[in-house]
Image: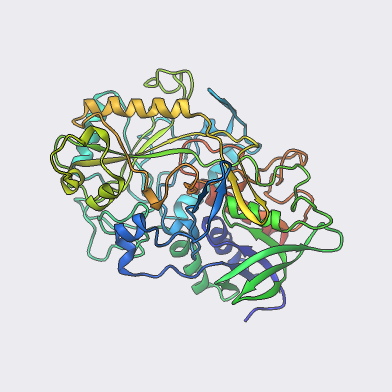
Amino acid sequence: MLEDRYDVVIVGSGPGGATMAWRLAQTGKRVLLVERGDYLKRERENWSTQAVFAKGRYQVDETWTSASGETFKPGLHYFVGGNSKVYGAALFRLRLEDFGAVRHPDGIAPEWPVKYDVFEPYYQAAEELFQVRGQRGEDPTEPPAPKPYAHEPIRHEPRIAELADGLAREGLHPFHLPIGGLIDQDETGAAKPHSKLLRCDPFDGYPSLTNGKADAQVICVDPALEAHPNLTLLKNATVDRLLTDASGRSIAGLETVIEGRRHTIRGDIVVVACGALSSALLFLRSANEHHPDGLANASGQVGRNYMRHNNATVLAISRTPNPTEFQKTLGLNDFYHSHAKSPANPFEFPLGHIQMVGKSDGTQIEAEGLPAFLQWLPERPFDWIAKHSIDFWLTSEDLPIPENRIYYRNGQVHLDLTQTNMEAHGHLRAMLRQICGKVEIHPHLMDRKLYLGKNTPIGGTAHQAGTLRFGEDPTRNVLDLDCRAHGIDNLYVTDASFFPSIGAVNPTLTIIANALRVADHIAGRLGA
């Protein structure tokens, strides 16, 4: 049963909201966590390639419109735990250099107003909270970290170990990916009998049937609910609008739809963590006489500066079979910076990051269709290709430009996206092709366009960021340095909306670390 008022109301149970709820529940204050979805059902389809990828079983059933007028379904997931229920759990710190201005062919990724030294202790706490498996010292681009990972890395299986050795012989620096995978390994790397995470293909992009993924529900929501009766989870509830008081300087209520009926929820402090796209839409829907263009939008930047990385998922064919069961263990950052800091990169600008992804199977390959370089085969041996596949995820930084934005037009959601920095992304792909030719892999790359059941880039919203960026100047930014909305005293945001730039590694660990940072500020404000 809902109370009349809460000390804190948090909207969204993904990594930013769930981490905030976990931390603030420890203060003893009354905390309400509002989630528009329910728990994702544990069912056989969790590990069905056809259900998850081809049919998009767990994606939202919404239709948005692109700048060209084409409609698409966004890659969003409304469940307790948010998009982390299907994320790949690669939990990276941004590089030290990512907090400064970085020059790219299409422009400059802007400097962050809060630097790495402030985030570092929160990164450490985030890695420990989400039980990240990793190994310091292997990746030459990793930022300073005074403590080791609390858990040993997930070990490479033989074919991936061979690949790592081959990359090292070429003078590169392969490293064990920092993964939020809850595996308990024996001395060979095999999962022990009671390990939550098994060594199996369905991980990257799939829900975890065994709860073996360190997602926001498993790590934060459920443990906090069990330990703290002052925390309440409200499911299947959509916050439609944020209501301000008569002055327009404080949130007085949250207009929320529950089972088709509207309710007003009240909280002394409100934290929005719906994901960068949905949080911006909530700010825009909440326009009123004091905020005619949307909450905290004196800068005109609400919904703008959208970023989502230049991502590509590609399949290469190993000359020898690749029987790997859990492939997502290896990363490569030798092209992350420009030439001076990344000697393997021949260009004077950064290219980006390479990592392994979950292994393809025959169903995925058949759904994708064979690329031209395999059309000469007399038959279409999808399972044979899958047995020889080695699969990579490529990430290059994109730039925050005001024209890339989410907004409403005639009551419909529009997402405008002009690609930036694709020159670097193309060079990164070429570097990977060259590498493959040297390590017993055919130098051809097949795009896996249906990864997560949608085509990239417009529907590929897994790395959404930047729509409510933070900074000291309210004429240029939406949030202040504590991620509090400019001009609204009790409204905070703790998803990736606040990012001024996005680097070229997965943003989730930075979301978690920032939520812990902001939670400390709010706890102090509450006198806890």
For this orientation, the residue located farthest to the bottom is 1
Q: Nearer the viewer, residue 395 or 268?
A: 395
Q: In the picture shown, does residue 391 fall above or below 167?
A: below
Residue 167: x percent and y percent?
Answer: 26, 29
Which is more toward the observer, 322 or 211?
Answer: 322
Residue 139, quarter of the rendered image: top left
279 or 512, which lies in front? 279
Examine the rendering and report whether any part of residue 393 can be seen: yes
Residue at the location (59% across, 68% down)? 34
Residue 344 percent location from the top left of the image: 36, 21
The correct choice, above or below, for 347 with respect to 24 in the image is: above
Q: Nearer the viewer, residue 435 or 522?
A: 435
Determine whether 128 is above or below 119 in the image: below
Q: How many numbered marks, from 0 up?
A: 0
Q: Is residue 360 visible?
A: no
The image position of residue 492, as x and y in percent, is 68, 55
Q: Position of residue 305 (x, y in %)?
A: 62, 39
- Quadrant where the image shows the C terminus: bottom right
**Horizontal relation, residue 310 to residue 362: left or right:** right
